[in-house]
Image (tube, grey):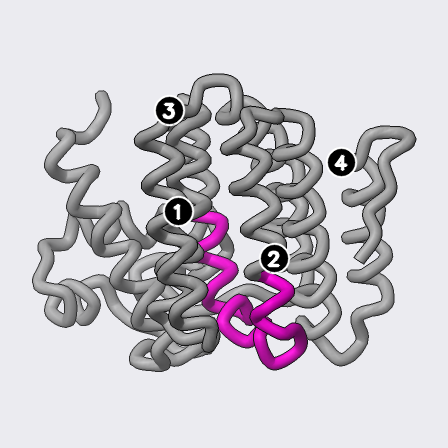
Amino acid sequence: MSPPAESTSRSEQIAADIRDAIRDGHLQRGVLYSSRELGERFGASRTPVREALLKLADLGLVKIERNRGARILGQDGRGIVELCSLRVLLEPPAARSAAAVMTARDDAALATEFETMKELADGSPEYFAADERVHELIMQASGNLRLVKIVSELRETLSLDGRYSVPEHQPVDVALQDHLDIIEALRRRDGAAAERAMRKHIVRSGDLLVAHSSQDNRSLLAEWRRWVEIAVPPGEHIHF
């Protein structure tokens, strides 16, 4: 029997709150937290806390320890490779699908969020919130609600391990141009161009995230590039 919708919604909110607390340093990696302690911290009963921890365990962010609680893990370099690989496989074709069904209202919403990104252009949390909304709007326009949820979780999990540090290694202007290329292709309803632009953006971001995920990252970079080769159609070359 599936859990009630109210319980599911509450557990998803707690999972998001725990992710935020890990990112902000309020929950320390390597530390074991009991379900009771987390429930008191987030004002929730045991059942939604347990469900939230199971979701986070599936994402590799916590390790459930029987009768003890959950240990905060975060993502290691391999986890980042896996997350980026899923994004490059899922988001580009979704952008192509979105181009076929987008409306003028979608265009306006994307333009509003992009203007916010341009006005800030500082790699701040507010900048990344607008970035997040751009991607979410595109996924929503694709019409696949499960995909919206999956991609949102992938991006939120990546934010714990380096997405906010990307501007340290890449000018924000580069990311702005990537997003503008995607949005302009969507505005023209050019699905193939939107797919290529999205793929280029995710590969660029993935290269940075994987490269700075660990000190010994040669094998991780090789694994990431293998997934990129799978995602990029024959004859398409990504140039930065």
Earlier sequence position, callout 1 versus callout 2: 1
Quarter of the image with the N terminus in it: top left
The percent coordinates of residue 237 (x first, y second) are 87, 42
Earlier sequence position, callout 4 versus callout 2: 2
Give the Cα separation between the discs numbered 1 and 4: 28 Å
The percent coordinates of residue 84 (x first, y second) are 63, 51
- Residue 170 forms part of the magenta stretch: yes
Earlier sequence position, callout 1 versus callout 3: 3
Amino acid under label 3?
Thr
Task: Specify start and end residues of the magenta stretch as a single range.
Answer: 153-175
The correct choice, above or below, for 193 with respect to 181 in the image is above
The answer to whether the residues at label 1 and label 2 have Cβ atoms under 8 Å apart is no
Give the Cα separation between the discs numbered 4 and 2: 22 Å
Give the Cα separation between the discs numbered 1 and 3: 13 Å
The answer to whether the residues at label 3 and label 4 have Cβ atoms under 8 Å apart is no
Which is more foreground, mark 3 or mark 4?
Answer: 3
Earlier sequence position, callout 1 versus callout 4: 1
Task: Classify mark 4: helix, strand or loop.
Answer: helix
Q: Residue at x 40, y 75 (%)?
A: 124
The correct choice, above or below, for 137 with respect to 16 in the image is above
Amino acid under label 1?
Ala
Task: Classify mark 2: helix, strand or loop.
Answer: helix
SS assignment for the magenta stretch, majority: helix
Q: Would residue 89 be found to the left or right of residue 50 on screen?
A: right
Q: Is residue 95 visible?
A: yes
| Residue hosting label 2 | 177
Residue neighbourhood size for the residue with mark 4, other residues' Cα within 10 Å, grouped as few (<14), some (14–19), many (≥20): some
Give the Cα separation between the discs numbered 3 and 2: 22 Å
Earlier sequence position, callout 3 versus callout 4: 3
Q: Is residue 149 visible?
A: no
**What label does residue 111 carry, if any?**
1
The answer to whether the residues at label 3 and label 2 have Cβ atoms under 8 Å apart is no
